[in-house]
Amino acid sequence: MLYLSIEMTNKIKVFVGFLALIALFSVYSFFNSFDSSSPITKTANILNNSLSFEVDSDADHDGLTNREESYWNTDFQNPDTDGDGFKDGEEVASRHDPLIPGPNDLLDNGNLTNKLSKLTLSGLYEGSLRPDSPNYDKSLNDMALAVMDDATNSLSSKIDPTKFQVVGSSKENQEIYLKEISVLFEDFLQNYGDEIKNLQKYLELIGSDGFENKNLIIFFQTKENNFQRIFNTGYSLNIPRNWIQEHAYFLYIVKVLQVVSQSIAQGSDDPVKASVALNTLGDIFENLPKLLGFFTDKIKSENLDSPFFKSLMQ
């Protein structure tokens, strides 16, 4: 009989929230890397010394407003900041980096920590994130929500049931499916339970060493590989037609955990995304009864017998 007995304490949740807050505001250290000759510093100096600067105008006629110039860290008085022959606005519109000469300058929008840094810079330069701004609280909240939304979307997954190997809904096919999915479900619970049981230990390591801790990286890389294996095996099963919805939801949860584990393992590259991933890890635990309910309700409605799922509900 398999039991999943795990306690998500308030201490863990508060710590995760605090960790996300640290990641949010740590980007201000980004400023320390600028010298007086950088385009960003030049732009900041001009903004601070000019009363006529208009954030929605396009001073250099490159297709980016002055507000957008501050977001992209480009020189609002130079239409081609990187000097590669293409205007800054043209490069942004075609998903090229206006700060890096082509051809190898395609934008990578996946790093949420870098995005947060740019948004913070933009808000400080145009004024909305300055402490004395009347819109400071709202601007800070809007920025945090925007990054959180992006993080949530990046951790989600889409399952295409049209790619399932669908078979008829005979009792024989359903019983075969239940035996096979029981093995995968147990594997899934063991790996996820292992993550939750060790979460507080790794949170403490993150608190002292950051996301660079080797043991943390190895642990979550292993889990990432395990969830990917479970996901691939799940897609290869023969799915009775009347079990498509339940199976799709199971694979969705497994895929989310694979992405979450990957994000935590790569947390040194993107601590903001990794912090949101840690919160997602706890959220899945709270929604686990819904996943189990889908399967047990279907087993009852189809008058089937599954010792494994029966043991989970005892």
Image (cartoon, rainbow, N blue to C red):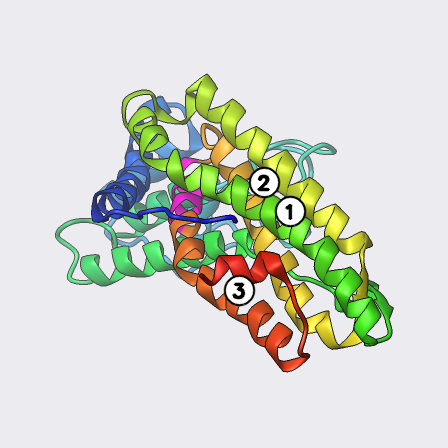
- State the residue in front, 120 or 227: 227
Q: Which residue is mark 1?
A: 91
Q: Residues within 10 Å of mark 2 (few under 14, many from 20)?
A: many
The amino acid at mark 3 is Leu
Q: Residue at x 46, y 43 (%)?
A: 193
| Mark carried by residue 122 | none
Q: Residue furthest bottom?
A: 301
Q: Which residue is mark 3?
A: 291
Q: Are marks 2 and 1 in contact (CB under 8 Å)?
A: yes
Query: From the viewer's perspective, is 206 left or right of 186?
Result: left
Q: Residue at x 83, y 68 (%)?
A: 173
Q: Residue furthest left?
A: 132
What kind of element bears circle 1? Answer: helix
What kind of element bears circle 2? Answer: loop
Residue 299 percent coordinates (x, y): 63, 73
Secondary structure that dominates the magenta span: helix
Residue 305 percent coordinates (x, y): 66, 68
Mark 2 or mark 1, earlier in chain: 1
What is the magenta range?
Answer: 271-279
Q: Are marks 3 and 1 in contact (CB under 8 Å)?
A: no
Q: Is residue 278 magenta?
A: yes
Q: Is residue 171 magenta?
A: no
Mark 3 or mark 1, earlier in chain: 1
Q: Residue at x 53, y 64 (%)?
A: 291
Q: Nearer the viewer, mark 3 or mark 1?
A: 3
Residue 283 visible to an observer of this rendering = yes
Q: Which residue is mark 2?
A: 98
- State the residue in front, 248 or 280: 248
Query: From the viewer's perspective, is 307 left or right of 261?
Result: right
Q: Alpha carbon of mark 3 to alpha carbon of mark 1: how far?
A: 45 Å
Q: Alpha carbon of mark 2 to alpha carbon of mark 1: how far?
A: 6 Å
